[in-house]
Every structure is written in C-alpha cells, then in structure tokens.
Amino acid sequence: MAEAKNVSFDAIMADLKARKYVPLYYLMGDEPYYIDKISDYIAEHVLQPEERDFNQTILFGSDVTASQVADAARRYPMMSQFQVLIIKEAQNLNNTEALERYFKSPMPSTILVMCHKNGTVDGRKKEYVRAIQSAGILFESKKLRDRDLPHFIETYLQIRQVSIDQKSIQMIADNIGADLSRLTGELDKVILSLPDQQDRRVTPQVVEDQIGVSKDFNSFELRDAIVNRNIFKANQIIKYFDENPKAGSIYALLPLLFNYFQNLMLAYYSPNNQSQEAVAAWLEIKNSWSAKAYMTGMRNYSGMKVMQIISKMREIDAKSKGLDNPNTPPGELMKELIFYILH
C-alpha cells in the first residue's frame, strides 16, 4: 500500500476553499465519501460555470488509457486560468508509465483529480508513488472505525448549528453504521425536519420519527441494559426484536456487543482504570462521556466474565453462519447470548 502524505481531509478542503490548488489530487481508499466530497468540490468551485464547457472534463478509467489521460492533462485551458480533469474509477487504468512521466512534470494550469476507490496505489510501484507525491497530494480515504462514529455525527451536526444528545448519537451510529454516504444522507434528512429556529436539537424522538429507530427498543438501549445488568429491560427489548425483526437482529447486534466487550477487556489494562478520562484516552475515544459505559461495565463484569462472553460471542457468530448449527434460528441464538451475558 502506498504511503499517503500526512494531509487530512479538513486540510485539503481548507486549501481548496482558499483557492490554493496543486496540479494533482490522487484520492484513494476504501471510504468513497471523502473522495467524492473532494472531487465534487473541485468540480463545482474551481471554474466558473461559463468556463466549464471547454475546461472541465470527466473521464472513466475503464474507458481511457493512461496515455490518453496524460495527453488530456497536457492541454492548455481555453480563456481560463485552469483546466480541471477528473478521472473516475482510476483504479481501472493499466500501464501507468505515461502517467508517471506526466506526474514528474505536471502542467501547472491543469488540476488533475484521480479517484481511485476500493483500494490504494500498489506500494510496490515506488517510482509511481514518488511521482504522485512530487506532483501534488496523495490522500488515503480510510473507513471510519465504529468508535469514531459518535464524534463524526456530533461534529457533522455542530458544523450545521444543530445539537444532539448522547443517546440520539448512539441510536444513529448503531442503526446506520459506518457507511458515511448513507449516514450523512440520513443526518441531512434529520436536519431538514427540524423547525427553523435558533436552538435546533436532535432528540431520540426526532431520530425515531425520521430514521425509524424506536427510542425505547433499539440496540443502544439493549447495550445500556446489558452494561447495567438490567435483566428485565434487556428481555423486553429482545422480545421486541423477536416480534419486529427489522428493528434488531443478531447480525447487527453481534458486532456492536463484540466491540463493547472487546474495549471493556482493554479498559481493564488502562494504567488508570479508575478515571473516566484516562480510560477514554486509553481506548482512544474522542468524547470522555463515551467511557462511562466502560466504567460501569468494569463494576458489573469481572475480567474473567468478559473473556468468557467474548468466547461465547465467537461461538454464537459461528452458529449464526450455520457452523455446527443445523436448525437454531437467529432469534433463539440472540436470546441464548443475552442470557449467557446476564447470568
């Protein structure tokens, strides 16, 4: 895998908004959201509308050769300071020698955007990688980790002057997951539903109304019941899930609980596991309030029990995929797991 320059999405966007451009933006990685945001911004803001007909071109890597891209990049703009050349699906380009030569001496009047999704540049092509880095920016768009989702949601809304409580954040994160395109689409829908007033807030009721997640029976509430060993509430939610399979399934629940208990196991090894802030830093959680669940978990579950729970989860995960399980339905596997955790 190629090593990207130490440049963040926010830093790239800040320079673009300040009209500070480089000849090449090589955007690669497994998270298409940031790649699309950067390339779309360049397409919409570098040139004036009247300049785009002659100076903005979008090509697809499966339809052109590297030589054709290099030739197009060497053209001069017409009655404009820049020409913008965007290559979608750049991962489909083969025989990149012509591009490597171009990257070593790029046209200062061309802004070339290479969109390489679902992977990265082959790190074995060291000269090619160095040529990219010498010409401009090599940016890797990485999938967001589940533990980073709450911070992303909160920040996304704050920028749009919308506040949100912790429960609503977790409800959205648990229900939507780390597909940022879908997540931001749902957040935009929520924002549009809010009244046009100064104090705009997202509450569990808003999440329930707009995204369709029950504010009382959802994976966040189930995790909370498990953390606090509230057997009655956990059984209520499991019964609701059993009757409403779309509200929650073992396939969505297992990763959520595994992530929690895996982090809980790590929390025991924190140099200062009596401090919520120290545990948050140890687990690399951006918001210290998120560590509260781990403080409670360490009080309610021993380290040995946590290890046993993780082992049980692996067993249930295998059974949910049909291994050593001829006929137990997913709902019963979920009940078996929750009973094991709480007893």
Image (cartoon, rainbow, N blue to C red):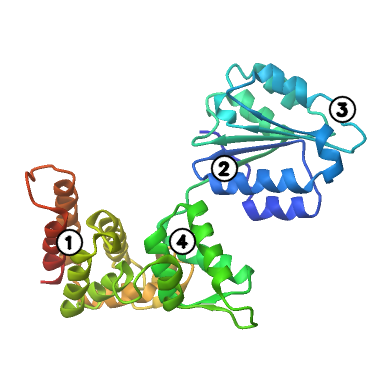
Q: Is residue 85 above or below residue 315?
A: above
Left or right: 164 in relation to 27: left
For label 3, the SS is loop
What residue type is disc 3 on? Answer: Tyr
What residue type is disc 2 on? Answer: Glu
Measuring 14% from the left and 71% from the top, which residue is drawn there? 342
Measuring 28% from the left and 70% from the top, which residue is drawn there? 223
Location of mark 1 (residue): 309
Percent x, y of residue 154: 53, 69
Left or right: 204 in relation to 250: right
Location of mark 4 (residue): 149
Location of mark 3 (residue): 76
Location of mark 2 (residue): 140
Percent x, y of residue 313: 18, 56
What residue type is disc 1 on? Answer: Ile
User: Alpha-carbon distance for marks 2 and 1?
Assistant: 36 Å
Does the CB distance between marks 2 and 3 fall below 8 Å? no
Measuring 34% from the left and 72% from the top, which residue is drawn there? 214
